[in-house]
Image (cartoon, helix red, strand yellow):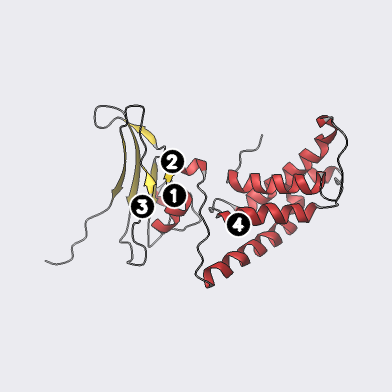
Amino acid sequence: MYSPINLNVFTAAYSGALAGMGVSGRTPSDPNSGDYATIASTVGAYAQAFDINWGSAPASALALESIQEMSEGNWAGRTPPNANGQVPATYNTEVQAIIAIVNSGGTYFATQGIVPQSVPVAESLSQGVWFIDALLGNDSNDGKTALTALKTDAQLQSRLGKSAVLIGQVDNSLGFPINLVTVNILNNMPQTDPINVDLTLPANSDGDGGLVYIGKATTVLT
């Protein structure tokens, strides 16, 4: 049983490879889905390799579409390999090359000042606690603890997606349940990383919920 790190990336890689191996350049005629089990398993190994090499970093709409299209092109006309083809590590080299191409597209967009649409990761929407550390954080982290904090709020907003509907986690600290998302700011954030929220706040069936940013006081003048 495999649990994707980034479901969006895993799905894009899987659907593209499935199309490439199963349909591209062919005219399918077999209506029995069981006859495609080997293809489905092989594609699954490829998608796992892609997901593992991509990691927890969010993927924009540009990246996801590129992953799907490139995965289809990568598998077009190829036949299912031998048993080694169902081992994810078999595909590390080609996956890393495709990721490099995907990233080069993202770099071009950035140089042109084009911001591709963000795509929320379902797991991120339900995460109830986040940590951001401008000094010691890393935007490739999961943001779940102080030791694995993100570096920027921009990265958090990218993972949540523009106009996304937060889910959060149930919090009873007020004496009644609310759906809450708490963002802990561990160090001063630079002016280049302003908090810019464009989200629908989490809420339970009674409409109770909220988004809270918690920082640490800094003495500016004595």
Does label 4 or label 2 sit earlier along the sequence? 4
Question: Marks 1 and 2: which is nearer the front?
Answer: 2
Query: What is the C-alpha distance between the residues marked 4 and 2?
Result: 23 Å
Q: Is residue 192 left or right of residue 7?
A: left
Residue at point 68%, 45% (across, down): 48
Are dots 3 and 2 in contact, CB under 8 Å? no
Residue 217: image quadrant is: bottom left
Does label 4 or label 3 sit earlier along the sequence? 4
Measured along the vertical axis of the image, is residue 90 above or below residue 99? above
Query: Which residue was labeled with disc 4?
Result: 63
Query: Which residue was labeled with disc 2?
Result: 127
Measured along the vertical axis of the image, is residue 111 above or below residue 145? below
Label 4 Cα neighbours within 10 Å, binned few <14 / some 14-19 / many ≥20: many
SS label for mark 1: loop
Name which residue type carries label 3: Val
SS label for mark 2: loop
SS label for mark 4: helix
Name which residue type carries label 4: Ala
Residue 63: image quadrant is: bottom right
Query: What is the C-alpha distance between the residues marked 4 and 1?
Result: 21 Å
Q: Which mark is residue 143?
A: 1
Q: Which mark is residue 197?
A: 3
Are dots 3 and 1 in contact, CB under 8 Å? no
Are dots 4 and 2 in contact, CB under 8 Å? no
Question: Marks 4 and 1: which is nearer the front?
Answer: 4
Residue 33: image quadrant is: top right
Query: What is the C-alpha distance between the residues marked 3 and 1?
Result: 17 Å
Question: Marks 3 and 1: which is nearer the front?
Answer: 3
